[in-house]
């Protein structure tokens, strides 16, 4: 009798979702709807309602050697970082492919998205694609996000076919519309020398800045004045910016940009950056090559 009562008590602790609870599909659809729209505030409280306690919003950023690393934060970090951007700029995002796995009350979803946005005072439209990795738990209120982790498509990480809709319906290939969007190409004997773009870890000798990494960061801090939307605030309260650029075969810097900036660098900043000393170019098989860098720099707004 006591064992039967304990069993009934345990069942009462794991109630199935009610009919009014949110379905998995509705949760994903609502996520995209909450981010999309013209410039203005988003309904962040509604988004919180779709998140479990202590839900994490993580993004792929880049370490100092150009390798990928996670930018980990809470939903509050995400709102603080992304909120000002949405208030100033129109942003439309939609899902174009989904891969779902469910077991019991947990779900893992790879959701491919396509987004377009305009920046305040700029009529040009920018586009990007990427993949969200959603981890969700089913509660009595419906499906809720535990982790939201995303990776923006880049020249070095083009979306594979498995994450795209059928070709007959697929949107044209899009990478983030930045100055540094040259797709990677594997060398062939027929290609012109110097036409390829490499990561630092793919070559024999990476480019080197005079004085090393510390000198580079100090010099960049002297000249860069990025806008408030360019900063990423980490859980420990520190603020960082991400920069991307190419060091060409002659050691010159090309296509420098602050990743995530809502306005281009000023002419004065570009002129100042052009006065920085040349690098020692990277080399592969003894030949100078073009190398793309992604660099995170601690920066106080």
Image (cartoon, rainbow, N blue to C red):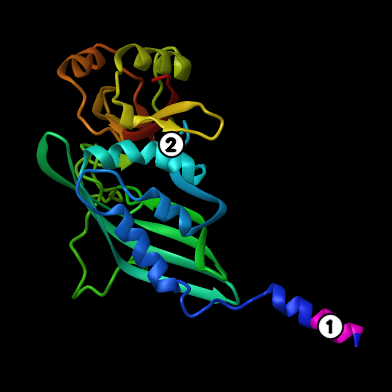
Q: Nearer the viewer, residue 124 or 205?
A: 124
* Placement of the N terminus among the 4 image quadrants: bottom right
166 versus 30 height, above or below: below
Q: What residue sits right under mark 2 in the picture? A: 66
The reply to whether residue 202 is in sight is no
Instruction: Decide if residue 8 is on the left or right side of residue 255.
Output: right
Crowd tier of the residue under label 1, counting other residues whose Cα lies within 10 Å: few below 14, some 14–19, many 20 or above? few
Which residue sits at x=41%, y=58%? 132
Instruction: Give the dominant element type of the magenta stretch: helix, strand or loop.
Output: helix
Describe the element under mark 1 as helix, strand or loop.
helix
Q: What residue sits right under mark 1 in the picture? A: 5
Describe the element under mark 2 as helix, strand or loop.
loop
Span shown in magenta: 2-7
Q: Nearer the viewer, residue 141 or 285?
A: 141
Residue 198's image quarter? top left
Which residue sits at x=38%, y=64%? 111
| Residue 154 x %, y % | 32, 48
């Amino acid at each position: 009798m006591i064992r039967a009562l304990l069993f009934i008590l345990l069942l009462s602790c794991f109630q199935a979702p009610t009919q009014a609870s949110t379905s998995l599909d509705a949760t994903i659809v609502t996520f995209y709807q909450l981010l999309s729209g013209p410039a203005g505030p988003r309904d962040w409280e509604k988004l919180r309602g779709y998140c479990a306690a202590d839900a994490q919003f993580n993004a792929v950023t880049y370490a100092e050697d150009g390798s990928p690393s996670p930018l980990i934060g809470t939903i509050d970090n995400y709102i603080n970082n992304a909120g000002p951007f949405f208030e100033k700029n129109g942003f439309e995002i939609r899902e174009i492919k989904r891969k779902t796995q469910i077991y019991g009350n947990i779900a893992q979803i790879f959701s491919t998205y396509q987004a377009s946005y305009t920046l305040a005072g700029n009529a040009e439209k920018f586009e990007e694609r990427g993949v969200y990795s959603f981890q969700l738990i089913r509660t009595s209120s419906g499906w809720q996000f535990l982790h939201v982790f995303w990776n923006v498509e880049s020249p070095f990480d083009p979306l594979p076919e498995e994450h795209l809709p059928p070709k007959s319906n697929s949107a044209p290939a899009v990478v983030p519309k930045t100055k540094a969007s040259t797709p990677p190409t594997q060398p062939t004997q027929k290609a012109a020398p110097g036409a390829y773009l490499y990561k630092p870890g793919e070559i024999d000798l990476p480019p080197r800045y005079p004085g090393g990494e510390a000198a580079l960061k100090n010099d960049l801090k002297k000249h860069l004045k990025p806008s408030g939307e360019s900063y990423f605030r980490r859980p420990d309260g520190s603020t960082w910016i991400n920069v991307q650029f190419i060091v060409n075969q002659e050691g010159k810097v090309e296509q420098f940009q602050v990743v995530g900036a809502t306005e281009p660098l000023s002419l004065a900043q570009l002129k100042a950056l052009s006065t920085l000393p040349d690098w020692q170019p990277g080399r592969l098989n003894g030949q100078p090559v073009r190398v793309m860098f992604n660099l995170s720099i601690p920066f106080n707004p």
